[in-house]
Amino acid sequence: MKIAVVGTGYVGLVTGTCFAETGNQVTCVDIDANKVARMQNGEIPIYEPGLDVLFDRNIAEDRLKFTTNLEEGIQDAEVIFLALPTPPGEDGSADLKYILGVANDLGPILKSYAVIIDKSTVPVGTAEKVHTAIAANATVDFDVVSNPEFLREGVAVEDFMKPDRVVVGTNSDRAKKVMEKLYAPLVRQGNPVIFMDERSAEMTKYAANSFLALKITFMNEIANLCEKVGANVDDIRRGIGTDSRIGKRFLFAGIGYGGSCFPKDVQALAKTSADYGYDFRTLRSVMAVNDDQKKKLLPIVNDYFSGDLKGKTIAVWGLAFKPYTDDIREAPALENIKALLDAGANITVYDPEAMDNVKKLIPGITYCHTAYAALDDADALMIFTEWPQFRTPDFEKMGKLLKEKVIFDGRNLYELDTMKDQGFTYYSIGREAVNPVVLA
Ligand code: UDX
């Protein structure tokens, strides 16, 4: 099939590259001429494990192309993906200016029937707005379909190539056939393409992400309560996750969820609810609890240093909002670093992928080449991202490098017994503190 993908952000590039990999002719369109030129030269603009190999191969085999020219990009395309940003506006609602801008441009240049696919996460009712915008100037038949993505950063290629399910919102039989053909290679193992109307497909995406955010937040609150009653959240997770109605995944308590999706989508669904006069109370709680959770370790650090962080050096392991990505959007580490700087602390950090992105935002901290270098002469270690390389460190070496053997762990990386044996003071989430400092 001939496919156009408008917008080469994270979702657009994964979509375009993966559909090229399944044998389609894909042209990616973006207004950023510099980025397009770089991609034309074979340079991949994002870090996503496994994507580079597919990107190189499909460019080399002539199935993946890039242009800044929308008309040229969509020429003869049977399907046109819109994978454009939907940043939250002041009030939390998704801003549709990019999507509707392209929809307006598409009308006059469509030359034959095409399925226009909303891939971005967009509020309920957007497919209808896109339809109206295109129809205003279109001279040919077309359908607008909602086809939300469920890609996790870091495993996006795998999620794309082997989806748990594909959700397609359309009432058009013609569009359904096109979508079935498009996704056939990806659902051969029997995972379903679930058809529904546009509004339900749009809502499905928000419901999925909000539910996952709720699941994590619930566990974070269980963790907070565990600390008070003297229980261990890891055991609770194992104890409830084996119930297939609950499921094992997304039950890890920690320093709060971040990233480009959960915070934005929970906020947007709450806004949609408010717009329709419905007070979605659980969503409001999820947002409030997560905001607090991200700051949860700060008072503990403050107490440890008797309320005076001036001149203390805090080593930070992990900046990205989760492992295997350089994405720092809504990452808990950033808010914490800023608060520590405000309190007069010095910061030394290490993250395997995300340091370049943070350098632009937070100058005046020390970026280190290794995890251990960040510990050298630091007064304490804080952990914000569960990169695998942090999981089994050389504790003896850590103890020698740190001025004080104290770790504040937002990701529960270490066993409590190990920390006891190694003689660390160790604070984590939803578990008893090891060798805590007792306040006078
Ligand atoms: C998410 C959805 O999973 C994906 O389907 C959607 O399309 C986009 O949003 P992503 O934001 O890439 O993907 O990351 P994900 O792995 O879902 O993690 C989101 C956040 O939740 C991270 O901050 C992570 O640290 C946190 N998390 C996840 C927990 O705190 N505990 C868990 O058990 C799982």
Image (cartoon, grey):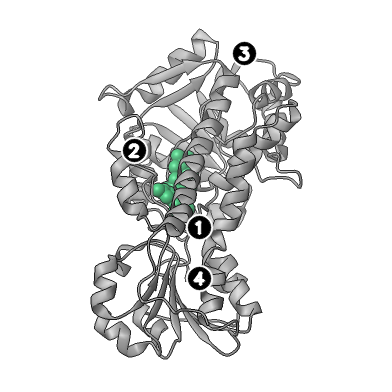
Out of 240 and 203, give the one closest to the viewer: 240
- Numbered disc 2: secondary structure: helix
Q: Is residue 280 left or right of residue 319?
A: right
**Residue 356 - label:** 4
Instruction: Name the residue furthest top.
Output: 173
The answer to whether one can see residue 388 in this image is yes
Look at mark 3 in the image and give the residue it sits on. 141
Q: Earlier in the sequence, mark 3 or mark 1?
A: 1
Q: Which mark is residue 21?
A: 2
Q: Quadrant of residue 247?
A: top left
Q: Residue at x 35, y 89 (%)?
A: 401
Q: Looking at the picture, how far across and down is residue 150, in whole percent?
A: 45, 36
Q: CA distance from mark 1 to mark 4?
A: 19 Å
* Residue at disc 1, secondary structure: helix
Q: From mark 3 to mark 4, how far is it between C-alphas? A: 46 Å
Q: Name the residue type under label 2.
A: Glu
Quadrant where the N terminus is found in the figure? top left
Badge 4 density bin: few <14, some 14–19, many ≥20, Cα 10 Å: few
